[in-house]
């Protein structure tokens, strides 16, 4: 991969618009499985033009009260009031995400 080929491959993969037949053919090959199913989808133009649409309002009601979350935010920021076994679990998860490092000094900071 060279810098000169980058625009060609960005167009072939859909990050840019294809500009020639080769880029379009590559794009079609990559996304050939994409199919749109519009069965049962109808548009009522008369209602749209008459502005006679009825909006459906969906309200989101959180199950947890905001005052119950405040203590968790403080623990997440400071971590000082976490039990030892929870702190150990967090450290273990972070070590696993970092490729198995065991919490030693980072590269270049020794």
Image: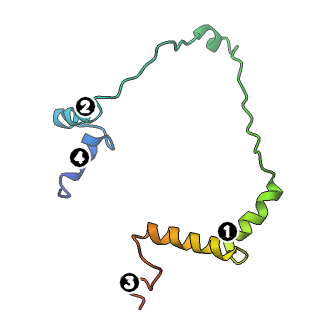
> Are the residues flagged by discs 4 and 1 in contact, CB closer than 8 Å?
no
Q: Which percent across, then down, holds residue 56?
A: 71, 24
- Nearer to me, 16 or 72: 72
Q: Earlier in the sequence, mark 4 or mark 1?
A: 4
The earlier-in-sequence mark between 1 and 2 is: 2
Residue 75 sits in quarter:
bottom right
- Residue mark closest to the camera, 1 vs 2: 1
* Residue lying at 57% horizontally and 70% vertically, measured from the top left: 90
Which of the two residues, 99 or 14, is positioned nearer the viewer here?
A: 99
* Res 9 label: 4
Give the CA distance from mark 3 to mark 1.
Answer: 26 Å
Q: Which mark is residue 28?
A: 2
Tell me what residue is drawn at x 67 percent, y 11 percent: 50
Local crowd size for mark 4, using a 10 Å CA cut-off: few (<14), some (14–19), many (≥20)? some
For the residues labelled 3 and 4, the Cα–Cα distance comes to 35 Å
* Label whose residue precedes the other's in the sequence (2 or 4): 4
User: Label 3 belongs to which residue?
Assistant: 107
The crowding category of the residue bearing disc 3, from other C-alpha atoms within 10 Å (few below 14, some 14 to 19, many at least 20), is few
Mark seen at residue 30? none
SS at badge 3: loop
Return the x and y of residue 65 as percentages of the image width and height. 81, 51
Mark closer to the chain start, 3 or 4: 4
Real-space CA distance between mark 2 and mark 4, rounded to the nearest whole angstrom:
13 Å
Quick check: 33 left or right of 65? left
Element at badge 1? helix
Residue 51 vertical placement versus 11 (above, below)? above
């Amino acid at each position: 991969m060279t810098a000169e080929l980058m625009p060609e491959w960005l167009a072939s993969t859909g990050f840019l618009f294809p500009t020639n037949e080769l880029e379009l053919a590559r794009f079609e090959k990559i996304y050939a499985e994409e199919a749109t199913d519009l069965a049962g989808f109808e548009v009522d133009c008369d209602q749209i033009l008459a502005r006679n649409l009825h909006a459906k309002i969906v309200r989101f009601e959180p199950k947890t009260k905001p005052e119950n979350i405040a203590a968790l935010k403080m623990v997440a920021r400071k971590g000082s009031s976490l039990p030892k076994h929870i702190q150990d679990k967090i450290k273990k998860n972070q070590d696993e995400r970092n490729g198995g490092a065991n919490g030693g000094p980072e590269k270049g900071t020794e």
